[in-house]
Amino acid sequence: MSQSVLLLPGDGIGPEIVAEADKVLRKVNDTFDLNLDFDTALVGGAAIDATGGPLPKETLDKARKADAILLGAVGGPKWDHLEMALRPEKGLLGLRSGLELFANLRPAILYPQLASASSLKPEVVSGLDILIVRELTGGIYFGQPRGERVLENGERQGFNTYVYSESEIRRIGRVAFEAARQRNGKLCSVDKANVLEVTVLWREVMNELARDYPEVELSHMYVDNAAMQLVRAPKQFDVIVTGNMFGDILSDEAAMLTGSIGMLPSAALNSEKQGMYEPCHGSAPDIAGQGIANPLATILSVAMMLRYSLKAEEAACAIEAAVSSVLDQGLRTADIMSADGRRVSTREMGEAVLAAL
Ligand code: NAD
């Protein structure tokens, strides 16, 4: 049976990097007989220009039917003057909520060839391989009530609600335990259970889930300590699971341990394992159209797509090995350039990965 992939190039460097990832996906489709169908649609600023809105109904319909989605990036100065509801980023949020993509997987892997790109000492980060599992559709970013009000004494007050139901915690917990089971069997749940009741419940539910996964070693850490441990001794972590806001912050911190935003893929999954895959970086308007963007985060997002949504582990590993091989060859886009590297363009990097495959 065929599986379908929807490509959403988006804005800025999005079309340039998705073009390279597309070639790689088509190549493994042929090599591994994956029987994939491809389609493309508009999202973000490109969709605003063509249709007036960041997430046309046609795009959402196609996304709902697809087994997996590959997104480049959205946004750019051209659309910054628009009101919030019409901004390109709303297209992204609409896809996340429309498809109930509650589980955000963000690996932070340091390729040994790029150890000098990290701001931490090589011995602290070399061999780093962490997976952060962040809850993406709940918590304080979505809790009601929220807003700004004026108190009786005339003072203004802003407020948000930090809320998680048991089922929301349980479903993200299961994703994290499953991931830990497939990796090194260590899961650290990050909360603030010494202060916030909502995360006391979070901790209770994680402990309940642990009974179903005896092979996974569960630990708990307060978020302030986790932020510190990530820069002190990041290799102590295997999988980290946490809520939306803590995950937002910790995953960016972990990303920087690897030194290069152009190398980091991500996945957002729903309960059917349907997923949207995208690089962690944005549309990089400052370098768009110059052919110098690093396509590797997007190509590695394709590997995640093959692993998590398309059940093609062998093809995923082949892509990851090909990326490692081009780094071994010393090929570097500008963002990861080193003294002994050979500088290549976006297209040359994509072609090199194809050749290594
Ligand atoms: P950014 O990630 O686009 O860029 C930050 C810096 O990293 C820039 O200097 C850029 O040139 C560089 N960079 C990013 N990706 C790169 C790559 N693949 N290769 C080489 N260099 C790369 O973040 P920003 O500048 O804060 O945001 C630009 C636009 O992207 C904004 O409109 C923002 O809203 C949007 N954005 C979109 C997403 C998304 O689509 N998921 C995520 C973040 C930001």
Image (cartoon, rainbow, N blue to C red):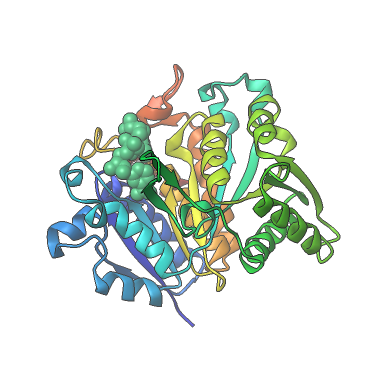
- Please state if 263 lies on the left or on the right of 232 as rendered: left
Q: Is residue 345 visible?
A: no
Residue at 65% over, 38% down: 223
> Furthest-bottom residue in view?
1
Residue at 45% over, 66% down: 29
| Quarter occupied by residue 69 | bottom left
- Looking at the picture, how far across and down is residue 257, in whole percent? 56, 30
Residue at 86% over, 60% down: 214
- Looking at the picture, how far across and down is residue 79, in whole percent? 18, 47
Front residue of 262/216: it is: 216
- Looking at the picture, how far across and down is residue 152, in whole percent? 40, 45
- Please state if 283 lies on the left or on the right of 126 as rendered: left
- What is the tally of numbered marks visible in this picture? 0
> Furthest-front residue in view?
153
Residue at 63% over, 21% down: 122
Front residue of 46/223: it is: 223
- Looking at the picture, how far across and down is residue 68, in whole percent? 44, 67
Q: Is residue 231 visible?
A: yes
Front residue of 329/199: it is: 199
